[in-house]
Amino acid sequence: DIQMTQSPSTLSTSVGDRVTITCRASQSISGWLAWYQQRPGKAPKLLIYKASSLESGVPSRFSGSGSGTEFTLTINSLQPDDFATYYCQHYNSYSVTFGQGTKLEIK
Amino acid sequence: QVQLVESGGGVVQPGRSLRLSCAASGFAFRSYGMHWVRQAPGKGLEWVAIIWYDGSNEYYADSVKGRFTISRDNSKNTLYLQMNSLRAEDTALYCCARGIIDHGMDVWGQGTTVTVSS
């Protein structure tokens, strides 16, 4: 089974900062990776799919990159609404694996 | 609007069964694969199962294989999760999500809570 490992687990940051979250796959997953944002008490929200495609309606300060086994989510100019937990996800037609999550905290 | 609404959660004793439902509206339910995803209290997201758009294939996480069954009724726009032999570690918020093979899970329900406790 493919394992997804995110780092860091927690990130203390400030409004206006640029943050990068990394997700590593235990084997090559080509570009089948998505990123989700989850605010407390809310359902996850799709941000990025196919590693770098921005979901409709998601602000352009969110971007994704990578292929193979290493992927990153970058958030430019962090806004108050962005303090949440972020998950990477590998998906295909028969299996899904989530990373363990990265929580953005206000410094 | 596009919506998924789960129901059927509750408190159940270990070893018992429960069936969850997910009612879809606002989109062509029969055209999409569907997932169940769960989240234990204070923990991360865990994928549970997927069923293809036509119900022809279903796949499960190892943690639920042989105990849970995902199914759908496209005539009723409803997704199901039959959960048997429930364990304490199955306690979680269970959400259904619409899946697109090259896109991820783009629509999520708010979830229904399952508590397994004696």
Image: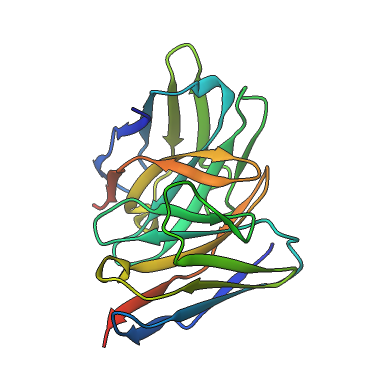
- In which quadrant will I find the C terminus of chain A? bottom left
> Is residue B107 or residue B81 the one in the foreground?
B107
Q: Quadrant of residue B88?
A: bottom left
**Residue B76 in the image, given as x and y percentages of width and height:** 42, 14
Vertical comparison of B79 with A52: above or below: above
Vertical comparison of B100 with A63: above or below: above
* Furthest residue toward top: B75
- In which quadrant will I find the N terminus of chain A? bottom right
Q: Residue at x 38, y 82 (%)?
A: A10
Left or right relative to A93: residue B17: left
Q: Residue at x 33, y 53 (%)?
A: B92
Left or right relative to B35: residue B40: left
Q: Residue at x 43, y 74 (%)?
A: A76
Q: Residue at x 35, y 31 (%)?
A: B3
**Residue B10 in the image, given as x and y percentages of width and height:** 24, 40
Query: Which color scheme did the rendering employ for the protein?
Result: rainbow
> Is residue B77 or residue B117 the one in the foreground?
B77
Vertical comparison of A53 with B95: above or below: below
> Is residue A38 or residue B51 the one in the foreground?
A38
Figure label count: 0
Vertical comparison of A21 with B42: above or below: below
**Residue B95 in the image, given as x and y percentages of width and height:** 38, 44
**Residue B26 in the image, given as x and y percentages of width and height:** 39, 23
Left or right relative to B79: residue A43: left
